[in-house]
Image: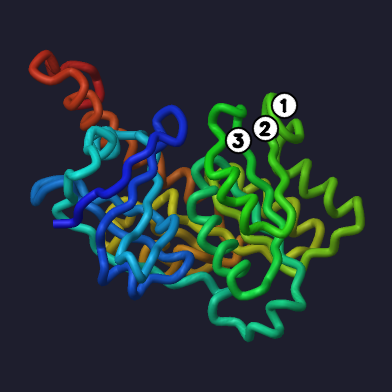
Amino acid sequence: MYKIIKKQELTTNIYLMEVEAARVAHSCAPGQFVIVRMDAEAERIPLTICDYDANKGTVTIVFQTVGAGTKMMADLNEGDSFHDFVGPLGCPSELVNEDLESLKQKKILFVAGGVGAAPVYPQVKWLHEHGVAADVIVGSKTKDLLILEKEMEAVAGNLYITTDDGSYGRSGMVTQTIKDLVAEGNKYDVCIAIGPMIMMKFVCLLTKELEIPTVVSLNPIMVDGTGMCGACRVTVGGKVKFACVDGPEFDGHAVNFDEAMRRQTIYKTQEGKAMLELTEGDTHHGNCGVCH
């Protein structure tokens, strides 16, 4: 069993949990993920690692309640335990395998959208610990939905906050801030974008135009986390890949985002049914049009 030693609601429906998982903490690297289950019959939920402490033997995860499984997770409290906490899975960020001196010469830009700030944070933190400064853009719909601002500020070379409604930081989409930074004379060697699929798509369209190599993390489309369910099947450079076993990071300019987003809709029906069963309980009558 894997005990939850810290639980924090970062903002509405977004939670942080620090979990005792010594073996995972000693082996993981930025960019990897874990699979958690509440009990032996529960849904498998893949979550990107937000932070880890090998000395304490803990791993930090951040998740948003978007379905029945994550709603049940949100009901867990400090002192409760996960039945399974499997990892680290997936390939680490390419940055951790690069020559450190070469890495220090690069101008790196991270773009995080919404909950994407969680998987961006460990990569920026790792770079900071190794003497590499990176610019970071963190975008959210509103100020109230912004997460990990103070943590990111402590490790980023320059941090730029954007909100769609202009309620905090810069006003507008993250793509506008990218344009602004480039117009100000910043020349980036690589961009790493993590967030909603639609955000990553438009970041990649822009960075391709600006000739900035871009890496994206396709963790948002993972379901089973083992490559068996097919939910995270994606075409990259004309070849079939699976985000959970071949990624989650890929060349963003080679990803067929439109195909990947269409595939996501296939799995929403079952998730919707599970959420109705959870919220309606014994009153769930099965004639909602989703179940049959």
Which x, y percent locates residue 88?
33, 68
Q: Earlier in the sequence, mark 2 or mark 3?
A: 3
Check whether the beta carbons of the residues at disc 2 and disc 3 lie within 8 A of each other.
yes
Q: Residues within 10 Å of mark 2 (few under 14, many from 20)?
A: many
The residue labelled by disc 1 is 166
Q: Residue at x 68, y 48 (%)?
A: 137
**Looking at the rendered structure, which numbered label has been put on residue 140?**
3
Query: Is 144 drawn above or below residue 196 in the view shown?
Result: above
Q: Quadrant of the N terminus?
A: bottom left
Query: Is 253 drawn above or below residue 92 in the view shown?
Result: above
Front-most of residues 81 and 286: 81
Element under disc 3:
strand
* Quarter of the image where one finds residue 86: bottom left
The residue labelled by disc 2 is 163
Amino acid under label 2?
Thr
Q: Quadrant of the C terminus?
A: top left
Q: Horizontal placement of 46 versus 2: left or right? A: right
Q: Horizontal placement of 249 versus 185: left or right? A: left
Q: Residue at x 85, y 54 (%)?
A: 182
Residue with the most extreme front position: 55
Q: Residues within 10 Å of mark 1 (few under 14, many from 20)?
A: some
Which x, y percent locates residue 281?
13, 20
Check whether the beta carbons of the residues at disc 1 and disc 2 lie within 8 A of each other.
yes
Decide if residue 20 is in sight here: yes
